Amino acid sequence: MLQNLAKMEELLAKSKKKIGAVTLDFIRYLYNRINFSNRLISILGARGVGKTTLLLQIGALAKSKSILYVALDDLFFTDHTLYGLAEDFSKAGGELLLLDEVHKYPNWSREIKLIYDDFPELQVIFTSSSVLDIYRGESDLSRRATAYIFHEMSFREYLEFHHRFSFISLSLDDLIKNHEDIAHELLKKFKPFRYLPEYLKHGAYPYYAGDEMDYYQKVLNTVNLVLDIDLPAAQSINYENIAKFKRLLYVLATNVPFTPNISRLSEQIKLNRNNLSRAVHLLHKAELLHILFQQSRSISQLNKPDKIWLHNTNLNYAISQREPEKGTLRETFLIIHLSLDHTISLPEAGDFLVDHKFTLEVGGRNKTFRQIQQISDAYLVKDQIEMGVMKSIPLWLFGFLY
């Protein structure tokens, strides 16, 4: 018992130090979306988006609670269980347990389920890789955990993080209905085309420090960690196939937006059709790819997507190591900002159908309505314009959706 108490004091001291060191100067969008009245909360996201920082900030802002932050790869767990930790923390009056990267702990879902059931006074917030299906396995958490997906930084967040601008996020309905007035007010405060090229190159992850080549190497390192560690840990994947996944990602990066020919791609990557389809869906789940289907088709791991993009424009630059096409950058920028809160599919005419309602056609300043003129609720999304008029909306404005 005394040994357990000493270990708990050691963990609490380490936790207090980490929480005390985290900066509160910039807090990502997700914090204000979390309903902290729930007892079990999961934050799922790709590597590099800032899950650990957010978890520590949650601890720093919950000052009235007895808090313990612990990473699940801590050496403490070589001879202690997660359930035992929660039990000791609860007995010591603990209220908030912050668990980082739970997928690094075996049987995590079963123990978290038991913690939830056995210690009703304890709130648990945990983070994990976006490739992890928290509702799959021996313990069903779907009736217990409230899950949040944590995306890369938006253009709005990039402006705040790197340039200290402060803007509120927009709803899609408000943006579409009032884009002229909104753009007019925003343009009084900043010039979007001074900052948009920066964001496209190095604005998605909060670790750019002024050197693009160093940043792209960090992005590639992050991609490799997802493929080498997160995917095998969270999904039953043969390690021999990881190299083929990397080859697939490079092929897609140099050809996006990509309309897949599964047979040809299967030969090129040396993966059979079923494994190739699974690979594409897993890379989508890992937030390395966006996959879209025609509006009439359902999403299934057995179905090949109708079109594929990399998940953000920074990945385009880092993986392909060349200047991406403008059309690719425009479409990727739009998808990443729409995909958080909205459903996107491919319409018969136009580029994207959003929420089964709005048809969007994306292009440069000279793009016309010719392809969507017969469609109601259809809009042009134009790059290279500061302000739009009527149904022509500036592309950069969509960067304020979260």
Image: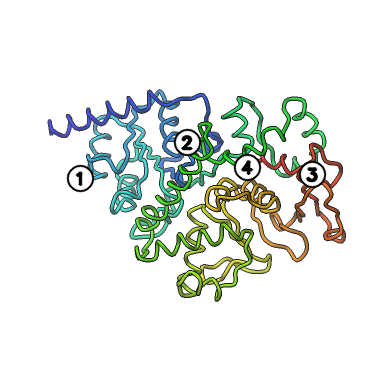
Is residue 203 depicted above or below 301 in this figure? above
- Dot 2 amino acid type: Phe
Q: Which mark is residue 36?
A: 2
* Front one among 173 and 258: 258
Mark before the other along the chain sequence, 3 or 4: 4
For the residues labelled 4 and 1, the Cα–Cα distance comes to 42 Å
Please indicate whether residue 133 sits to the left or right of residue 190 in the image: left
> Could you say where residue 335 lies in the image, as x and y percent from the top left?
64, 51
Give the residue displayed 84% in from the left and 57% down from the top: 376
For the residues labelled 2 and 1, the Cα–Cα distance comes to 31 Å
Q: Residue furthest left?
A: 2
Quadrant in which residue 157 is drawn: top right
Within 10 Å of disc 3 (Cα), the crowding (few <14, some 14-19, many 20+) is many
Q: Which residue is mark 4?
A: 200
- Dot 3 amino acid type: Ile
Foreground mark, 2 or 1, reads 1
Q: Secondary structure at mark 2?
A: loop
- Dot 1 amino acid type: Thr
For the residues labelled 2 and 3, the Cα–Cα distance comes to 36 Å
For the residues labelled 1 and 3, the Cα–Cα distance comes to 55 Å
Do the numbered discs 3 and 4 sit on residues whose CB atoms are within 8 Å?
Answer: no
Mark before the other along the chain sequence, 2 or 4: 2
